[in-house]
Image (cartoon, grey):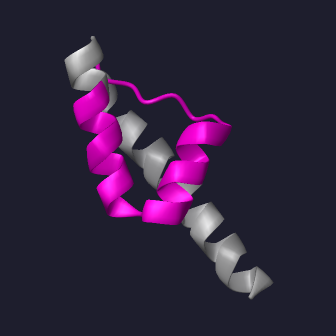
Amino acid sequence: MITKVLKKLVFAVVLLYSFNLISVKFGLIIPINYITIALVTLLDIPAMILLVFSFILIF
């Protein structure tokens, strides 16, 4: 149980970091903080899509 949560947590951090590496050329950076890591850990890829669209709409 704990290892599954830790795997998802590490996956979320790697996913956010890799997205930021790619999207910095387009000027779209999602901050890596507790809220975004928690969202991506719980909801995986749909949370990333939600974060991208929300940051596009806000900025």
* Quadrant of the frame with the C terminus: top left
33 relative to 15, above or below? above
29 relative to 10, above or below? above
Q: Is residue 29 left or right of residue 8?
A: left
Front-lying residue, 36 or 12: 36
Front-lying residue, 7 or 51: 51
Q: Main secondary structure of the magenta part?
A: helix
Residue 22 visible to the viewer? no
Q: Which residue of the protein is positioned furthest toward the right in this rendering?
A: 2
55 relative to 37, above or below? above
Q: Position of residue 29 (x, y in %)?
A: 39, 25
The quarter of the displayed image where residue 55 is located: top left
Q: Residue at x 52, y 28 (%)?
A: 31
The quarter of the displayed image where residue 20 is located: top left
38 relative to 21, above or below? below
Over which residues does the magenta segment extend? 26-54
Q: Which residue of the protein is positioned furthest toward the bottom in this rendering?
A: 1
Q: Residue at x 30, y 43 (%)?
A: 50
Q: Residue at x 43, y 62 (%)?
A: 43
Q: Position of residue 21 (x, y in %)?
A: 39, 36
* Quadrant of the frame with the N terminus: bottom right
Q: Residue at x 28, y 15 (%)?
A: 58
Q: Is residue 43 left or right of residue 54?
A: right
Q: Position of residue 35 (x, y in %)?
A: 60, 39
Q: Position of residue 49 (x, y in %)?
A: 26, 47
Say if the magenta span includes residue 9: no
Say if the magenta span includes residue 31: yes
Residue 44 visible to the viewer? yes
